Amino acid sequence: PGGIHRHLDKAARLTVPAQFHFAGNDGHITDAHVDEARRAFFGRGDVGIHVYDGADHGFNCWARSAYHRHAAALSHGRVLTFLEGGSP
């Protein structure tokens, strides 16, 4: 969700369920950006925000040195559950 903080003014217009995955140690997407997203979607049961402690930017890309196997597997499972109609 890089750059999400620049589009949060549109959050109220989101009419479909959504899921966001953030690295806990991301130098590009800061904790402040994640907090802004949490505030923008507060109370939305159809929007999930997940943060992976110990993971860095690009944690889900196996070709990067930042690849974080545990965070990638956990996020992958959450996405599959979400796409099957489960919780965000």
Image (cartoon, grey):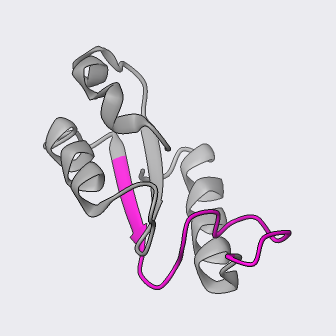
Residue 76 vs 34, above or below: the answer is below
State the predominant SS element of the stretch in magenta.
loop
Residue 58 percent location from the top left of the image: 64, 63
Q: Residue furthest front?
A: 27
Q: Nearer the viewer, residue 88 or 86?
A: 88
Residue at 40% in and 62% down: 50
Q: Quadrant of residue 16?
A: top left
Instruction: Point out the residue furthest to the right here.
Output: 63
Q: Quadrant of residue 69?
A: bottom right
Between 69 and 82, the residue placed more toward the observer is 69
Left or right of 30 on screen, residue 25:
right
Is residue 59 part of the magenta span, yes or no?
A: yes
Q: Residue 77's spot in the image, x, y percent?
A: 63, 67
Looking at the image, residue 52 sits to the left or right of residue 85; the answer is left
Q: In the displayed structure, does residue 60 sit left or right of residue 10?
A: right
Q: What residue is shown at x 46% (from left), y 56% (from top)?
A: 28
Q: Residue at x 66, y 64 (%)?
A: 76
Q: Position of residue 3 (x, y in %)?
A: 44, 37
Part of the protein shown in magenta: 48-66
Where is residue 43 drawn, in percent x and y? Answer: 13, 42
